[in-house]
Amino acid sequence: MGHLFRTLNFIHYLKKYAPTEKYIVAVNEDPKAMDILKRSEISYVPVDFDSERNWEKKLIDDYKVTAWINDRLDTETSTVRRVKECKIPVYTIDDRGPGAGDSDINFASLVFDEAEKGKIAGGRVFFGEKYLILNPEIDLYKKQKKSVRKILITMGGSDTYNLTLLAIGGIKKTELDVQVTCVIGPGSKCFAEAKKMSADSEGRIRIKSVVPSLIEEMSRHDLAITAGGVTAFEAAATGLPTISIAAEPHEKEICHRLEELGCSSFLGYWKDVTKEDIAKEINVIMSNPDMLCNMSRNGMEKVDTLGAKRIIEEIEKYD
Protein backbone atom coordinates (compact mmCIF):
# COMPACT_ATOMS: atom_id res chain seq x y z
CA MET A 1 0.00 0.00 0.00
CA GLY A 2 2.89 2.35 0.68
CA HIS A 3 4.02 2.01 -2.94
CA LEU A 4 0.49 2.81 -4.11
CA PHE A 5 0.18 5.95 -2.00
CA ARG A 6 3.61 7.10 -3.16
CA THR A 7 2.41 6.69 -6.75
CA LEU A 8 -0.59 8.89 -5.98
CA ASN A 9 1.72 11.57 -4.61
CA PHE A 10 3.98 11.33 -7.66
CA ILE A 11 1.03 11.76 -10.01
CA HIS A 12 0.01 14.88 -8.10
CA TYR A 13 3.43 16.38 -8.84
CA LEU A 14 3.33 15.13 -12.42
CA LYS A 15 0.11 17.05 -12.96
CA LYS A 16 1.73 20.16 -11.44
CA TYR A 17 5.21 20.11 -12.99
CA ALA A 18 4.49 18.25 -16.24
CA PRO A 19 0.81 18.95 -16.94
CA THR A 20 0.97 17.94 -20.60
CA GLU A 21 2.25 14.42 -19.82
CA LYS A 22 -0.24 11.56 -19.91
CA TYR A 23 0.13 8.53 -17.65
CA ILE A 24 -1.29 5.09 -16.90
CA VAL A 25 -0.77 3.13 -13.65
CA ALA A 26 -0.20 -0.62 -13.91
CA VAL A 27 -1.43 -2.19 -10.69
CA ASN A 28 -1.80 -5.76 -9.47
CA GLU A 29 -5.34 -7.09 -9.37
CA ASP A 30 -6.00 -6.07 -5.77
CA PRO A 31 -9.57 -4.84 -5.15
CA LYS A 32 -8.54 -2.33 -2.46
CA ALA A 33 -5.77 -0.84 -4.57
CA MET A 34 -8.01 -0.57 -7.63
CA ASP A 35 -10.77 1.03 -5.57
CA ILE A 36 -8.35 3.67 -4.25
CA LEU A 37 -7.21 4.48 -7.80
CA LYS A 38 -10.78 4.61 -9.04
CA ARG A 39 -11.86 6.98 -6.26
CA SER A 40 -8.81 9.14 -6.95
CA GLU A 41 -9.86 9.34 -10.63
CA ILE A 42 -6.47 8.03 -11.75
CA SER A 43 -6.14 6.05 -14.97
CA TYR A 44 -5.02 2.49 -14.32
CA VAL A 45 -4.91 -0.98 -15.82
CA PRO A 46 -4.85 -4.18 -13.71
CA VAL A 47 -2.13 -6.67 -14.65
CA ASP A 48 -0.81 -9.98 -13.41
CA PHE A 49 2.79 -9.15 -12.51
CA ASP A 50 3.63 -12.84 -12.16
CA SER A 51 2.48 -13.70 -15.66
CA GLU A 52 5.11 -14.97 -18.08
CA ARG A 53 3.26 -13.30 -20.92
CA ASN A 54 4.73 -10.08 -22.23
CA TRP A 55 2.12 -7.82 -20.64
CA GLU A 56 4.67 -5.00 -20.63
CA LYS A 57 4.81 -4.75 -24.44
CA LYS A 58 1.03 -4.86 -24.73
CA LEU A 59 0.69 -2.03 -22.23
CA ILE A 60 3.36 0.01 -24.02
CA ASP A 61 1.68 -0.51 -27.40
CA ASP A 62 -1.87 0.09 -26.14
CA TYR A 63 -1.04 3.33 -24.31
CA LYS A 64 1.91 4.56 -26.42
CA VAL A 65 4.18 4.62 -23.38
CA THR A 66 7.44 6.59 -23.75
CA ALA A 67 8.85 6.23 -20.22
CA TRP A 68 8.48 3.49 -17.59
CA ILE A 69 8.68 4.04 -13.81
CA ASN A 70 8.77 1.08 -11.44
CA ASP A 71 7.72 1.59 -7.83
CA ARG A 72 8.22 -1.96 -6.62
CA LEU A 73 10.51 -3.31 -3.92
CA ASP A 74 11.70 -6.27 -6.01
CA THR A 75 11.39 -5.70 -9.74
CA GLU A 76 12.13 -8.79 -11.82
CA THR A 77 14.82 -8.69 -14.50
CA SER A 78 12.34 -10.01 -17.07
CA THR A 79 10.07 -6.98 -16.65
CA VAL A 80 12.86 -4.44 -17.14
CA ARG A 81 14.36 -6.25 -20.10
CA ARG A 82 11.01 -6.60 -21.89
CA VAL A 83 10.44 -2.86 -21.47
CA LYS A 84 13.95 -2.04 -22.67
CA GLU A 85 13.39 -4.23 -25.74
CA CYS A 86 10.67 -1.72 -26.68
CA LYS A 87 13.31 1.06 -26.60
CA ILE A 88 11.70 2.60 -23.51
CA PRO A 89 13.83 4.08 -20.68
CA VAL A 90 13.20 2.51 -17.27
CA TYR A 91 13.38 4.42 -14.00
CA THR A 92 12.87 2.71 -10.66
CA ILE A 93 12.23 3.87 -7.09
CA ASP A 94 13.74 2.23 -4.00
CA ASP A 95 14.17 -0.98 -5.98
CA ARG A 96 16.16 -3.82 -4.39
CA GLY A 97 15.17 -6.44 -6.94
CA PRO A 98 17.33 -8.01 -9.67
CA GLY A 99 15.73 -5.83 -12.32
CA ALA A 100 17.15 -2.65 -10.79
CA GLY A 101 20.53 -3.33 -12.38
CA ASP A 102 19.05 -3.04 -15.87
CA SER A 103 17.19 0.18 -15.07
CA ASP A 104 18.49 3.50 -16.37
CA ILE A 105 18.09 5.30 -13.02
CA ASN A 106 17.34 4.01 -9.54
CA PHE A 107 16.11 6.66 -7.08
CA ALA A 108 17.12 5.05 -3.78
CA SER A 109 15.52 7.58 -1.49
CA LEU A 110 15.38 5.24 1.50
CA VAL A 111 18.96 3.95 1.42
CA PHE A 112 21.36 5.65 3.82
CA ASP A 113 23.80 3.05 5.11
CA GLU A 114 27.12 3.08 3.21
CA ALA A 115 27.31 -0.72 3.11
CA GLU A 116 23.78 -0.92 1.71
CA LYS A 117 24.51 1.70 -0.94
CA GLY A 118 27.03 -0.70 -2.46
CA LYS A 119 24.25 -3.25 -2.99
CA ILE A 120 21.94 -0.91 -4.89
CA ALA A 121 22.13 -1.34 -8.66
CA GLY A 122 21.13 0.84 -11.59
CA GLY A 123 22.61 2.70 -14.55
CA ARG A 124 22.72 5.73 -12.26
CA VAL A 125 21.69 5.76 -8.61
CA PHE A 126 20.55 8.76 -6.58
CA PHE A 127 20.54 8.29 -2.81
CA GLY A 128 18.85 9.95 0.13
CA GLU A 129 15.76 11.66 1.43
CA LYS A 130 16.01 14.53 -1.06
CA TYR A 131 14.41 12.10 -3.58
CA LEU A 132 11.56 11.07 -1.29
CA ILE A 133 8.12 11.45 -2.81
CA LEU A 134 6.06 12.92 0.01
CA ASN A 135 2.45 14.02 0.23
CA PRO A 136 2.21 17.63 -1.06
CA GLU A 137 -0.37 18.46 1.63
CA ILE A 138 2.50 18.60 4.10
CA ASP A 139 3.27 22.21 3.22
CA LEU A 140 -0.23 23.18 4.38
CA TYR A 141 0.13 21.62 7.82
CA LYS A 142 3.65 22.35 9.08
CA LYS A 143 3.48 23.15 12.79
CA GLN A 144 5.95 23.42 15.66
CA LYS A 145 5.10 20.99 18.50
CA LYS A 146 5.71 22.15 22.06
CA SER A 147 3.99 19.66 24.35
CA VAL A 148 2.28 16.28 24.10
CA ARG A 149 -1.47 16.16 24.54
CA LYS A 150 -2.37 13.91 21.61
CA ILE A 151 -0.51 10.84 20.28
CA LEU A 152 -1.00 9.28 16.83
CA ILE A 153 -0.34 5.62 16.01
CA THR A 154 0.05 4.84 12.31
CA MET A 155 1.87 1.72 11.13
CA GLY A 156 1.34 1.91 7.39
CA GLY A 157 -1.14 0.53 4.91
CA SER A 158 -0.66 -3.14 5.82
CA ASP A 159 0.92 -3.37 9.31
CA THR A 160 2.02 -6.95 8.62
CA TYR A 161 3.10 -7.66 12.19
CA ASN A 162 0.25 -5.88 14.00
CA LEU A 163 2.54 -3.23 15.48
CA THR A 164 -0.53 -1.10 16.13
CA LEU A 165 -1.46 -3.51 18.91
CA LEU A 166 2.06 -3.30 20.36
CA ALA A 167 1.85 0.50 20.38
CA ILE A 168 -1.58 0.51 22.03
CA GLY A 169 -0.23 -1.83 24.69
CA GLY A 170 2.69 0.53 25.28
CA ILE A 171 0.47 3.57 25.67
CA LYS A 172 -1.80 1.72 28.09
CA LYS A 173 1.28 0.98 30.21
CA THR A 174 1.89 4.72 30.69
CA GLU A 175 -1.50 5.54 32.24
CA LEU A 176 -0.94 9.11 31.02
CA ASP A 177 -3.72 11.61 30.47
CA VAL A 178 -3.37 11.89 26.68
CA GLN A 179 -5.70 11.37 23.75
CA VAL A 180 -4.65 8.66 21.31
CA THR A 181 -5.74 8.07 17.72
CA CYS A 182 -4.89 4.84 15.86
CA VAL A 183 -5.17 5.04 12.08
CA ILE A 184 -5.28 1.50 10.71
CA GLY A 185 -4.41 1.03 7.04
CA PRO A 186 -6.65 -0.62 4.45
CA GLY A 187 -4.47 -3.74 4.30
CA SER A 188 -4.25 -4.29 8.05
CA LYS A 189 -5.90 -7.25 9.78
CA CYS A 190 -5.86 -5.90 13.35
CA PHE A 191 -8.83 -3.51 13.37
CA ALA A 192 -11.11 -5.74 15.47
CA GLU A 193 -8.40 -6.50 18.02
CA ALA A 194 -7.45 -2.83 18.26
CA LYS A 195 -11.08 -1.93 18.98
CA LYS A 196 -11.16 -4.59 21.67
CA MET A 197 -7.95 -3.31 23.28
CA SER A 198 -9.28 0.26 23.37
CA ALA A 199 -12.69 -0.65 24.77
CA ASP A 200 -11.68 0.02 28.38
CA SER A 201 -9.96 3.35 27.66
CA GLU A 202 -13.09 5.47 28.30
CA GLY A 203 -12.73 7.09 24.90
CA ARG A 204 -9.07 7.97 25.43
CA ILE A 205 -8.00 5.70 22.54
CA ARG A 206 -9.86 6.09 19.25
CA ILE A 207 -9.56 3.63 16.36
CA LYS A 208 -9.99 4.82 12.78
CA SER A 209 -9.79 2.72 9.64
CA VAL A 210 -10.23 5.52 7.13
CA VAL A 211 -9.26 9.18 7.33
CA PRO A 212 -9.75 11.75 4.56
CA SER A 213 -6.13 12.89 4.94
CA LEU A 214 -3.41 11.27 7.05
CA ILE A 215 -1.38 14.50 6.83
CA GLU A 216 -4.25 16.53 8.27
CA GLU A 217 -4.63 13.87 10.97
CA MET A 218 -0.94 14.27 11.80
CA SER A 219 -1.41 18.01 12.24
CA ARG A 220 -3.85 17.37 15.10
CA HIS A 221 -1.30 15.41 17.12
CA ASP A 222 1.91 16.17 19.00
CA LEU A 223 3.77 12.84 18.85
CA ALA A 224 3.46 9.78 16.60
CA ILE A 225 4.43 6.13 16.85
CA THR A 226 5.25 4.81 13.39
CA ALA A 227 7.02 2.10 11.45
CA GLY A 228 10.19 2.96 9.55
CA GLY A 229 8.85 4.01 6.20
CA VAL A 230 7.77 7.05 4.20
CA THR A 231 5.08 7.92 6.76
CA ALA A 232 7.74 8.68 9.36
CA PHE A 233 9.39 11.12 6.95
CA GLU A 234 6.02 12.73 6.20
CA ALA A 235 5.49 13.17 9.93
CA ALA A 236 8.95 14.74 10.24
CA ALA A 237 8.26 17.19 7.42
CA THR A 238 5.07 18.39 9.12
CA GLY A 239 6.94 18.92 12.40
CA LEU A 240 5.51 15.84 14.10
CA PRO A 241 8.16 13.99 16.16
CA THR A 242 8.05 10.19 16.04
CA ILE A 243 8.93 7.12 18.00
CA SER A 244 9.90 4.71 15.24
CA ILE A 245 9.95 0.90 15.11
CA ALA A 246 11.51 -1.02 12.20
CA ALA A 247 8.87 -3.37 10.78
CA GLU A 248 11.27 -4.92 8.26
CA PRO A 249 15.07 -5.41 8.39
CA HIS A 250 15.67 -2.75 5.71
CA GLU A 251 13.71 -0.23 7.80
CA LYS A 252 16.44 -0.22 10.45
CA GLU A 253 18.62 2.09 8.39
CA ILE A 254 15.61 4.33 7.71
CA CYS A 255 14.89 4.66 11.42
CA HIS A 256 18.57 5.30 12.14
CA ARG A 257 18.55 8.08 9.52
CA LEU A 258 15.47 9.69 11.07
CA GLU A 259 17.21 9.62 14.43
CA GLU A 260 20.38 11.12 12.87
CA LEU A 261 18.26 13.97 11.52
CA GLY A 262 17.06 14.57 15.08
CA CYS A 263 13.36 14.14 14.38
CA SER A 264 12.71 10.61 15.70
CA SER A 265 13.59 8.24 18.52
CA PHE A 266 14.34 4.74 17.18
CA LEU A 267 13.36 1.86 19.48
CA GLY A 268 14.68 -1.01 17.36
CA TYR A 269 13.51 -3.91 15.24
CA TRP A 270 9.94 -4.87 16.12
CA LYS A 271 10.85 -8.33 17.44
CA ASP A 272 13.07 -6.68 20.04
CA VAL A 273 10.65 -3.93 21.13
CA THR A 274 8.34 -4.36 24.13
CA LYS A 275 5.33 -2.44 25.41
CA GLU A 276 7.54 -1.31 28.27
CA ASP A 277 10.07 0.17 25.80
CA ILE A 278 7.33 2.22 24.17
CA ALA A 279 5.92 3.41 27.49
CA LYS A 280 9.37 4.43 28.71
CA GLU A 281 10.15 6.47 25.59
CA ILE A 282 6.79 8.25 25.68
CA ASN A 283 7.48 9.24 29.29
CA VAL A 284 10.97 10.50 28.38
CA ILE A 285 9.69 12.72 25.57
CA MET A 286 6.71 14.02 27.53
CA SER A 287 8.92 15.01 30.44
CA ASN A 288 11.35 16.86 28.18
CA PRO A 289 9.62 19.68 26.23
CA ASP A 290 12.93 20.91 24.78
CA MET A 291 13.54 17.47 23.25
CA LEU A 292 10.09 17.51 21.65
CA CYS A 293 10.58 21.06 20.31
CA ASN A 294 13.96 20.21 18.82
CA MET A 295 12.65 17.05 17.13
CA SER A 296 9.75 19.03 15.66
CA ARG A 297 11.98 21.82 14.35
CA ASN A 298 14.60 19.43 12.94
CA GLY A 299 11.96 17.58 10.93
CA MET A 300 10.59 20.73 9.31
CA GLU A 301 14.06 22.08 8.53
CA LYS A 302 15.69 18.89 7.23
CA VAL A 303 12.89 17.08 5.31
CA ASP A 304 11.18 18.84 2.40
CA THR A 305 8.52 17.96 -0.17
CA LEU A 306 10.53 18.54 -3.37
CA GLY A 307 11.59 14.94 -3.99
CA ALA A 308 9.15 14.29 -6.83
CA LYS A 309 10.20 17.52 -8.54
CA ARG A 310 13.85 16.47 -8.31
CA ILE A 311 13.02 13.05 -9.79
CA ILE A 312 11.17 14.62 -12.72
CA GLU A 313 14.11 16.97 -13.32
CA GLU A 314 16.60 14.06 -13.41
CA ILE A 315 14.34 12.12 -15.79
CA GLU A 316 14.13 15.14 -18.07
CA LYS A 317 17.93 15.44 -18.05
CA TYR A 318 18.26 11.78 -19.01
CA ASP A 319 15.75 12.10 -21.85
Image (cartoon, grey):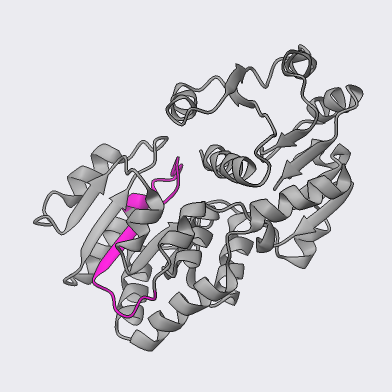
What is the quadrant of residue 27 in the picture? Answer: top right
At a point 50% along the width and 65% down the height, the residue shown is 237
Looking at the image, residue 201 sits to the left or right of residue 192; the answer is: left
- Relative to 138, does residue 303 appear above or below in the rendering? below
- Relative to 61, does residue 124 appear above or below in the rendering? below
State the residue in front, 74 or 68: 68
Q: Is residue 19 visible?
A: yes
Looking at the image, residue 216 sits to the left or right of residue 91; the answer is: left
State the residue in front, 303 or 54: 303
Counting every numbered tag in the picture gives: 0
What is the quadrant of residue 109 in the picture? Answer: bottom right
Residue 317, percent across and down? 86, 49
Residue 135, percent across and down? 51, 51
Q: Reply yes or no: does residue 153 show up in magenta.
A: yes
- The chief SS type of the magenta part is loop
Residue 228, percent across and down? 53, 57
Looking at the image, residue 34 sits to the left or right of residue 303; the answer is: left
Q: Is residue 272 visible?
A: no
State the residue in front, 274 or 1: 1
Residue 88, percent across and down? 86, 29
At a point 54% along the width and 54% down the height, the residue shown is 230
Image quadrant containing the C terminus? top right
Q: Reply yes or no: does residue 4 show up in magenta.
A: no
At a point 51% along the width and 72% down the height, the residue shown is 299
- Relative to 149, does residue 26 appear above or below in the rendering? above
Tell me the magenta residue range. Answer: 144-165
Looking at the image, residue 16 sits to the left or right of residue 145; the answer is: right
At a point 70% along the width and 48% down the height, the residue shown is 94
